[in-house]
Structures are given as C-alpha cells and as structure tokens.
Image: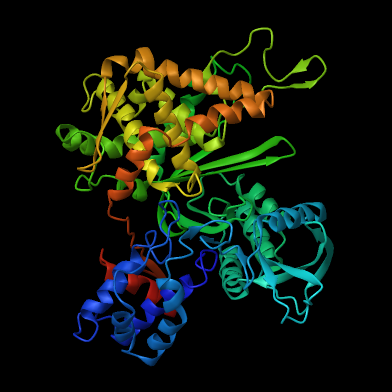
Amino acid sequence: MLRQTSSEAEGIFDLILALHEACDGKWNISSIEMLGRKILMHGLSMRGCFYRVWGDGDRKVIPNVSHEVLRKMASVSPDASAKFEEIITPMMEIQPAALGYPDGANQSGYYIGDEKIKKKDIEAITKMMEARGISPENTRLRKLTTSNRLADENSDVFEILQASAERDAEPLFLGELTMGEKRRARIYLRRGDHSEEMSKICAELTLACKVAATDEQKTALSQLVDSFLTGDYDIFRSAQKTWVTDKNPRVEYCMGFLFGYRDAHGVRAEWQAVAGIYHSGETEKMRRLFDKSAEFIRPFEPSELYVPDFAVIHVLASVSSTVWDATNITIDDDGKRHGVKNMVYGNRMNLNSSPNRPCYYIHPSEVETYMTYAHRVRFVTTAIYELIGHGTGKLLSETVTGKFKFGHANPLISPVTAATVEECRAFLIADYLADSKDILALFGYDQESTPTADEFNYYTYLQIGIEGLRALRSFKVDEQTWGSDHDQAQFTILKHLHQNTHNLFQITHDAQNGTLHIRLDRSKILSYGKPSLGRTLCKLHIWRSTANIETCRFFYGGLSAVDGEYKVRRKIVAGNIEPKWKFVQGSTFLGEDGGVEVREYEGSNIGIVRSFWERERGV
C-alpha cells in the first residue's frame, strides 16, 4: 500500500523502523530524543500510519524541520543514514504536492517511471486492457525510458505491472497503440509486482486453509491464493462470490485490491485488508434492524428486497489508508446481484466517542452536548447507511418490451428507491430515515431515553452540517476537484439543504478570526429538511434511470461546486488543523507449542512504531 502511494513512502517507513532499532526502542535517549520524536510525529501523522500524503485531499505533508536536523537524527546508525539519503529529496520537495494524474503538481503510485504518463495514454491503455480481458484493479502502469532494452527512440514503451507472487522472466507483448496522431507505443504485461509481499500473503492464507471451519471458507481462501499467486483478477472475483456465501463466520476477513478511491483514473485499486472476530452480542442488537429492514422499505419497494449479510466484528488487524468504520462489499455479476456483505467494525466505532477532540463548526454553547452523543449518532446512521442504504435501490427499467422491473402503472414515490453514486445514495438514505421512530426504537431511543428520539434526530441533522463543512478540507482549489468521493457527497447534501430548506441551516463565518459555525432550526427538520432530501433523491434517481447524464451532471456538479461564500469557508476549514487519528494495533504470534500470543502496545507514537517493528521482524 505504501508503494501505491509514492516513491518514498516505503523509505519513510524503513527509516522510522531503522531509528527504532538503532535506539533499541528507547526513544528517550539523548542522541535522538527530540529529533526522533519530530520525524516520528511526521511519519505517524500521514493518514494514521506511515503515508506521505494526508487524507485531506491527498495533499503532501512536509516535516517542519530542516535537512540538517533530519540528517543529524539519521546519523545514529549507518542503516538509518542510508535510508535517509534515499528519501530526503522527494520527502522535502514542495512539488508534487498531491496525488493525481502525474504532472508537475501531482504524482501517483499507480503511474510510475522517470517519464510522466499522460492521461490520454492511461485511457488508451486501459481500453486495450479491457479488450484483452485484463482487469486494472491489481495493476500499475510504468513508462520505460530509452535506456531500457525494450524501448527505443522511435516508439514509447509501457509495462502493465500486475500484482502476483509469480514473476515473469520476460513480459508478455500485448500489442501496439497509436498515441496521439503519430507516436506509436508498445504495450507489455509483466507479472510480479509486489511479489515479495504477495508470496508472504499466499503462504499465510495456505496455512489458514488448513484450519478453515467450513468448505466455503476453504474454497474462498484457496481461490484467493490462486489469484494472488497468478495475478488473475477473475479468480479473485470468484473468491469473493464464494466468500459472500459464508454467513457470519467466527473469524471474518476482507482483503484484496478493492477500491479505486486514490487512483485519479478511478480504476486501479489500493490494497486493503482487515481481519477480526465476530461479536455475537453486538451483532444481535443490529440484527433487529436487519430483521425489520424489509418492513421499513417494502411500502416503497413492493417487489422482493435484497437484504445483505450483516455483522459487527472487532478488528484485530487493518491495513488501509483509512481505518474505516465499516466496509460494504457488493458482488454483482452480469446485472444480477450475487451477494453483499456489510461489516461494521465495533471497536473502531467505539473510538468515535472522543469528547475531547475539537469540534470547530458548531456554536460553543452546543459543543459539549453534541460531542457527548456524536458517536451514538454515527453508530446508528452507519448501520442504516450500510444495511439499508447499500441494500436497496434498483434501476427502474423496461427489460423487454412491455416488461418492467417496477410497477410502472403505479410508480414508486419514495425517495428511498433513488440512486446516484452509491456512497452519496447511501448517505442520503441514512439521513432520510434518521427520524424513523421504529428504527430509533430498535437502538433504544424513544421519548424517555437520553437523548430522546427527537433530540437524536436533531443531532443527526447537526452532524450533516458539521460533516458537510468538514468535507471542504479535501477540495483541491487549483484543480477544482475533490480528493474524496465521500466528502464530495457530504458537502453536496449540506449545500442542497442550506439552499432549499428556508433557513433550516444558518452558516456564519468570520474570516479574520477564522471561525465558522452552523446553527440548526429544529422546527424545520421534518417540514423542510426531510422533504428536501427526498426531492434530491428522486431527481437523481429519475435521471440515472433514464440515462439523462447531462441533466444529472449539471444538477450534481452545481451542488458540489465550491463557489460563493463557500470559497471563504473552505479557507477557514483548511486552516482548522484537527489532530490526526492514529491507531495502534495488536499483533499475534504463533508459539512453538502451537499457542497464539496476542500482544498489545501502549497507545502512543512509540507504541505504534514498536507494533510495526515487531510484526516486521516477527519477534
């Protein structure tokens, strides 16, 4: 995953571990105490672990210390010094400043090489891959220089690097393309990207197969091994189809090249893996929503409702650029839904109860009460978002002449059936159902609870406002693009409610003092807020269902535009530095007697480094 981010990300990781080893984990020794802690803070602020870019628009983080100070720190050992020299220049350079299509201002770990790869080249090669049946998710693209034996001065040469344990001695020639009007390009496929890591993963999964509890688990794990060994993504899809049939296993996992959030082209996926233990008690609480979800939806979607598998698991290990609250995996095949798994990470969700974290965007008089209940609101809305949001919504279509996939004589009127970009749709459904007394009662909220059901709904809408403003941190002004699909969706929802609900939200800011506050009129939530969400959902669904791309793009593009006073508000948000989430994870070690040791670490920067060092060294 580090390798997919930037060229020096691995080097930063290796440098920190080298420093840890040089001082035998005793970071308080005088020779490196202050200097080491500065680089440690830098390395651990990079998206919760060891990344060179933040999640806030995927912008670059530069240590606030000089070259000389860093060099002195690294001099504590020859190994650290050598690693430092490898990464100092790219780590300290201002440009490229963010992730994106590679150019002077942006870079990408998916498009590598000494020569920059152009967007049109990426598009042409991706089309060739599609024609040849080569999936892009587990690949990167490299442009070779004329010094490479495969290249020459008369044509460009590109290698598609496919992640696999197996390595190709020679790349496979796929064919030639015309880039632009005249320039020719030869395209090769080379397996063996991330070979060392994929080999280790295959070895561990092979051992896991031997202790799998069911035939489905053994088959899914074996298919994963075959996929990671060969690089065949079709086998990976087969593994996922098998995996979704394994309902509520005691040990749950999810891994692979899954989501293309950080690829500018949106097709190459970041490695993500999570493993955890099924929590039966917490799942049973959520299963009440699971069992009754059809009742909440059926009046609006009278045909059969697909309800996904759902579980609360406690995460033992997570590898991702974001430590998510939950994961949804939907497996569709030839237009047919094969299966869905929703996993809510209970111990991650519990960490949202952090009343001492800053909350810049509501009036100080409301901060303490809101922060007391914020994690409860997030838990319930995440459950609705994952289970109902991702479990509903179908394309309204006429499959053959005269045969419809919906009751066309009595068109559905509920906005719950609306669909747009899947994440935005799921957010909107969670917001739309936030006032449901039946749903809130399943989680123990009524007019006698603390907070009451009405208060809970108030804090849900306040959360819409806060998250919509906070989302502005990922907007890239120079490119007028968003660094996060989730943030774009949350801002769009807030902006629509702000503009179309007769002052449901009031947003005030003071650019000189850097303050930005949102106030909510609770008397307008049901009369203006909910209907506004419903109208938005319905419009987007109609345009999507009828393939009215231009109208939808005009509407959604306008709502997600950061214009007018939002330009000033974005500057204020960008200036409000929030402490980065940092997560320390336990490690498991297999003893000689076959017993398993679970080792935990202190909740500190040093604890995080020690955990990575011990896992890396296997000690």
**45 vs 325, nearest the viewer:** 45
**Residue at (78, 78) in percent of width and height:** 150
Look at the image and tell me in which quarter the C terminus lies: bottom left
Q: Is residue 537 left or right of residue 375?
A: right
In the displayed structure, 484 sits above or below 619; it is above
**400 vs 277, nearest the viewer:** 400
Q: Quadrant of residue 553?
A: top right
Q: Residue furthest right?
A: 175
Where residue 413 appears, x then y in whole percent?
Answer: 56, 13
Where residue 340 appears, x then y in whole percent?
Answer: 58, 40
**Residue at (50, 18) in percent of width and height:** 535
Q: In which quarter of the image is residue 192?
A: bottom right
In the displayed structure, 92 sits above or below 505; it is below
Where residue 427 appears, x then y in whole percent?
Answer: 46, 33
**Residue at (75, 39) in percent of width and height:** 334
Q: In this view, does 124 lie to the left or right of 267?
A: right
Where residue 360 appears, x then y in whole percent?
Answer: 24, 41
